[in-house]
Image (tube, rainbow, N blue to C red):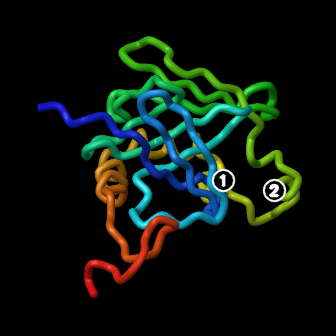
Amino acid sequence: MRSKPLSTVRLQSWGRPWQTITLEPESGRCRAHWFWRPSAGHVGWASQVQGAWYCLWNRDGVLVLQHGPSAWHFGEVHVSRNLVEGGRACRFTATVQGATVLDLRYRPVGQRFWNRDDPTFDRFDEELEDFFAMLERLSRDPEGQRGVTQALLPKHSSLPTRASVGPSPSE
């Protein structure tokens, strides 16, 4: 039996912890919510680059890479991220069964004003700021994928939401 389509899922904005992103999985439409704390845990991350949203999220125990309405099981995607144009750009590509499904050029986070002259900026900082650097590392780490999948399972919390009224079920 196939599960019913999800209307929306909540994702954490990569690099902006104060933002929650709601994703409509069928259409791929994303909306950013500032300083909004949902009652259920986030099931993934989203990053907006050049006006487009890219998401990694847990759908029924499987990591999914999504861009717009197109979605792929992350374990079946081969990703690569390279510096191009003499280090002035990054190129991120994702292929599934040899077919390129994503090809994106963007400015490297190391070229940002506050990172250029920071002597402590390293690959760990880069991964925390660059969603695609995280995807590349995670794609090579099956154990990490299992850990992320487990960490992104929907969680229930007693934090109040806009719609909740009265005592929590545990009281």
Question: Foreground: 39 or 68?
Answer: 39
State the residue position of label 2.
Answer: 115
Determine whether 76 is above or below 164 in the image: above
Classify mark 2: helix, strand or loop.
helix
Name, please, the residue furthest toward the front: 165
Question: Foreground: 70 or 65?
Answer: 70
Name, please, the residue furthest toward the bottom: 171
Determine whether 76 is above or below 57 in the image: above
Residue 124: percent from the left, percent from the top? Answer: 60, 58
Dot 2 crowding, Cα within 10 Å, few <14, some 14–19, many 20+: some
Q: Nearer the viewer, mark 2 or mark 1?
A: 1
Q: Is residue 74 left or right of residue 134?
A: left
Q: Is residue 146 left or right of residue 8?
A: left
The residue drawn where x is 83% and y is 62% is 118
Name, please, the residue furthest toward the top: 99
Tell me which corner region of the image, top left, top right, bottom left or bottom right, holds residue 156.
Answer: bottom left
Residue 126: percent from the left, percent from the top? Answer: 66, 52
Cβ–Cβ below 8 Å for labels 2 and 1? Answer: yes
Q: Is residue 79 left or right of residue 115?
A: left
Q: Is residue 54 left or right of residue 114?
A: left
The residue drawn where x is 46% and y is 74% is 160
The residue drawn where x is 33% and y is 64% is 155
Name, please, the residue furthest toward the left: 1
Q: Quadrant of the N terminus?
A: top left
Q: Earlier in the sequence, mark 2 or mark 1?
A: 2
State the residue position of label 1.
Answer: 129
Dot 1 crowding, Cα within 10 Å, few <14, some 14–19, many 20+: some
Q: What amino acid type should be assigned to the residue bearing mark 1?
A: Glu
Classify mark 1: helix, strand or loop.
helix
Residue 98: percent from the left, percent from the top? Answer: 41, 13
